[in-house]
C-alpha cells in the first residue's frame, strides 16, 4: 500500500471547500503542496497563506515541495506556516554537503526533510547520505507544470534507491511525482516507491475513487 499525496496544483480553487472535503474523506494521507518561485522553475504558484488555508481545512500531512532557487529561506517560511515535510531540490544548492546541512536544520525544527532530483539528475550522489533525509522525491517529469507525461527513466532510479536504502538499513521513503495515474502508479510501487504524488489524475475525476486506485 502506498501513501497517496494528491497535488493541489491541480485542485479547482473555485471549488476549494468541496474538493478539500473530498480529499479529507478519501484514503489520501498527505497533501502535496508545490511551491514554485518563477525562477528555479518557469512557473509561479503558492505562498505560505495558501498553506495556512489548507492547514485550517484539513488534518492531512502537509508535504511541501519547494522548487525554488533559495531553499534555505523558503524552508523556514513554510515551516513557520505549518509544513510537516519540506522537500527541496538537490540542483538548487551548490553541493551535497549544503543539502545535508539544510536537511539537518529542517529536522531540528521537528519537520521531515526531503530531497528531490530532476529527471536528468543521477541518484548515485545521494547513496552515502540517504540517512540524512526522510524522503527522496524522484521527479518523473520536468518540474514546473502539471499534466506532463510520465518519464519511465524514473523507475530505474526508484529501484536503485530502494536497493541502497535497504542495503544501508535506512528508513528513507521514496516519493515519485509526475504523470502518475493507476498504471504508472503501479509501476512505481512495484519498483519500490512508498509515496505517490498525483495531481490531474486525482482532481479531474472522482477524487475519492481516484485516490483508491492509487493505494
Image (spheres, helix red, strand yellow):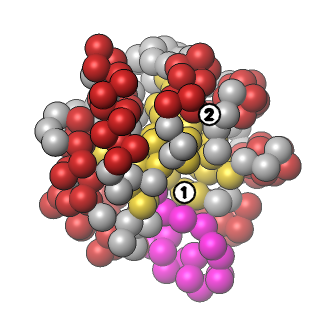
Residue found 65% across the figure and 83% down from its top:
169
Residue found 16% across the figure and 42% down from its top:
206
Residue found 77% across the figure and 44% down from its top:
106
Name the secondary structure under disc 1. strand
Q: Quadrant of the C terminus?
A: bottom left
Q: Where 210 falls versus 66 (above or below)?
A: below
- Residue 11 has which mark? none
- Relative to 92, 129 lies left or right: right
Residue 167 % position (x, y): 59, 85
Given residues 166 and 59, the one toward you in this image is 59
Residue 165 falls within the magenta-colored stretch = yes
Residue 52 found in image quarter = top right
Residue 36 % position (x, y): 50, 23
Q: Which residues are magenta?
A: 160-179
Which of label 1 and label 2 is nearer to you?
Answer: 1
Q: Is residue 116 visible?
A: no
Q: Which residue is mark 1?
A: 136
Q: Which residue is mark 2?
A: 92
Crowding at dot 2, Cα within 10 Å, few <14 / some 14-19 / many 20+, comes out as some
Name the secondary structure under disc 2. helix
Residue found 35% across the figure and 22% down from its top:
16
Residue contact between numbered discs 1 and 2, judged by CB atoms under 8 Å: no
Residue 195 % position (x, y): 43, 59
Mark 1 or mark 2: name the one nearer the start of the chain: 2
Residue 4 % position (x, y): 38, 55
- Relative to 156, 175 lies left or right: right
Amino acid at each position: 500500500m502506498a501513501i497517496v499525496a494528491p497535488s493541489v496544483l491541480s485542485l479547482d480553487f473555485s471549488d476549494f471547500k468541496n474538493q478539500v472535503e473530498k480529499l479529507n474523506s478519501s484514503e489520501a494521507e498527505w497533501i502535496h503542496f508545490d511551491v514554485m518561485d518563477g525562477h528555479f522553475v518557469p512557473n509561479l504558484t503558492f505562498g505560505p497563506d495558501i498553506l495556512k488555508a489548507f492547514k485550517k481545512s484539513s488534518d492531512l500531512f502537509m508535504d511541501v515541495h519547494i522548487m525554488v532557487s533559495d531553499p534555505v529561506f523558503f524552508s523556514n517560511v513554510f515551516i513557520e506556516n505549518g509544513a510537516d515535510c519540506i522537500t527541496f531540490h538537490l540542483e538548487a544548492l551548490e553541493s551535497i554537503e549544503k543539502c545535508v546541512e539544510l536537511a539537518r536544520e529542517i529536522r531540528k525544527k521537528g519537520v521531515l526533510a526531503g530531497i528531490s532530483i530532476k529527471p536528468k539528475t543521477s541518484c548515485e550522489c545521494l547513496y552515502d547520505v540517504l540517512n540524512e533525509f526522510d524522503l527522496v522525491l524522484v521527479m518523473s517529469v520536468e518540474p514546473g507544470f502539471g499534466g506532463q507525461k510520465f518519464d519511465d527513466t524514473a523507475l530505474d532510479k526508484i529501484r536503485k534507491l530502494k536497493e541502497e536504502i535497504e542495503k544501508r538499513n535506512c528508513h528513507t521513503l521514496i516519493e515519485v511525482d509526475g504523470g502518475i495515474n493507476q498504471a504508472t502508479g503501479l509501476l512505481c510501487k512495484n519498483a519500490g516507491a512508498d509515496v505517490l504524488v498525483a495531481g490531474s489524475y486525482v482532481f479531474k475525476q472522482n477524487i475519492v475513487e481516484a485516490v483508491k486506485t492509487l493505494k
